């Protein structure tokens, strides 16, 4: 008798994993750029206009990114686009990454244009210190063409052609090489005739009968009330009196005998050397913000950046320091 034939057990359905296509294996860089633009503007149509794309193309790129991540990033409503929690978390990483890539491209292009060095700086520093020494720089570095851009705004190195920024501050700028060039002080200055008429000041505190000239970035409260270098004092306009938003303009007005000026020490040297201005007090107080050489760390690899940095440091090392530095009252 033949043995019974066993029936084959039914096969379990095996769940096949979706194959990872080449398109999804690659990071969708184009979609990241579109996502950052939509997140910034909270609008598909606004992003389409900014990127010179159709709204449909923008939607397709967002879908590509959401498929890649397998999460929802944006919620479209009739009037506004909203980010999901996952979208909110992703935005700063995407923006930082795009900025780094763009900065890398700019560094390669900047290195290729060998002779041009773009420097962003304050107008006051350029007129009072740098312009008098440019002839020496060009004589010692004939292969470098300086392009000077004057502004008080912070420099976005990822979105500009600037190689170096010279700024007043505390040196705490993220992801930048910030190197102190010199410490800054404040001193009261006036024309010699005005000093003869009103006499010297004893130090920080009362200002006697002097007519005052005001600067928005060096307010007299720093001298009279001991408020030097604290947040909320710089860029302060006075309630009364003539006021300037240019630190060198204040010195020029003082040289014409119009009043007493509170000046940054580094800006005063040419006026003091020429005798146009004299110190109304032998005391000086720390400003609280110092002068820094700033650039992305990778830019230090450029010879032209190193040449300019070395030249600046050599000359600024000769800047005299006030003999009597006192604390504001």
Image (cartoon, rainbow, N blue to C red):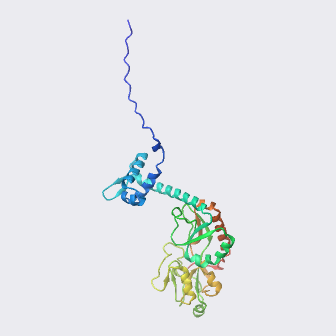
User: Is residue 84 in sight in this rendering?
Assistant: no
Residue 23, percent from left and from top? 46, 44
Question: At 60% across and 70% down in the image, what residue appears?
Answer: 146
Task: Tell me where residue 56 appears, x and y as whole percent.
Answer: 36, 53
Instruction: Give x and y (percent) for residue 104.
Output: 55, 57
Placement of the N terminus among the 4 image quadrants = top left
Residue at x 58% of width, y 72% of height: 290
Q: Is residue 241 left or right of residue 13?
A: right
Q: Which residue occupies 39% across, 50% down?
A: 60
Return the residue nearer the eye: 202 or 170. 170
Q: Residue furthest top?
A: 1
User: Furthest residue to the bottom?
Assistant: 197
Question: Given the current orientation, which residue lies at the most extreme left position?
Answer: 78
Q: Quadrant of the C terminus?
A: bottom right
The tally of labels here is 0
Does 319 sit left or right of 188 as displayed?
Answer: right
Nearest the camera: 149 or 315? 149
37 relative to 201 in the view: left or right: left
Compare residues 196 and 328 and report the one nearer the observer: 196
Q: Residue 153: horizontal and vertical position, in percent?
A: 50, 70
For the question of whether residue 126 can be seen, the reply is yes
- Where is residue 147, by image quadrant? bottom right
Front-most of 144 and 243? 144
Find residue 177 and report its image quarter: bottom right
């Amino acid at each position: 008798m033949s043995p019974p034939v066993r029936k084959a057990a039914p096969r379990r359905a095996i769940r096949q994993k979706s194959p990872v296509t080449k398109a999804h294996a690659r990071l969708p860089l184009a979609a990241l750029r579109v996502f950052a633009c939509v997140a910034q503007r909270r609008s598909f149509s606004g992003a389409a206009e900014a990127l010179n794309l159709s709204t449909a193309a923008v939607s397709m790129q967002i879908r590509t990114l959401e498929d890649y991540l397998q999460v929802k990033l944006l919620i479209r409503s009739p009037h506004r686009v909203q980010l999901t929690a996952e979208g909110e978390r992703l935005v700063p990483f995407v923006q930082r990454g795009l900025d780094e890539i763009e900065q890398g491209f700019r560094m390669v292009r900047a290195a290729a244009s060998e002779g041009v060095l773009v420097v962003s700086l304050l107008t006051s520093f350029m007129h009072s210190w740098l312009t008098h020494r440019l002839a020496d720089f060009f004589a010692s570095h004939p292969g470098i063409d300086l392009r000077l851009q004057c502004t008080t705004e912070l420099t976005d190195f990822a979105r500009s052609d600037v190689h170096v920024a010279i700024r007043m501050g505390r040196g705490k700028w993220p992801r930048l090489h910030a190197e102190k060039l010199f410490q800054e002080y404040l001193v009261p200055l006036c024309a010699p005739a005005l000093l003869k008429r009103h006499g010297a000041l004893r130090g920080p505190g009362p200002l006697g009968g002097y007519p005052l000239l005001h600067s928005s970035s060096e307010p007299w409260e720093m001298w009279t009330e001991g408020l030097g270098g604290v947040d909320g004092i710089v860029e302060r306009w006075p309630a009364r009196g003539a006021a300037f938003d240019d630190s060198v303009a204040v010195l020029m007005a003082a040289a014409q005998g119009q009043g007493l000026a509170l000046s940054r020490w580094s800006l005063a040297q040419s006026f003091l050397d020429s005798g146009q201005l004299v110190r109304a007090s032998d005391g000086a107080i720390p400003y609280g913000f110092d002068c820094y050489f700033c650039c992305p760390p990778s830019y230090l690899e450029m010879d032209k950046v190193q040449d300019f940095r070395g030249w600046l440091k050599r000359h600024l090392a000769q800047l005299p320091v006030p003999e009597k530095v006192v604390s504001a009252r």
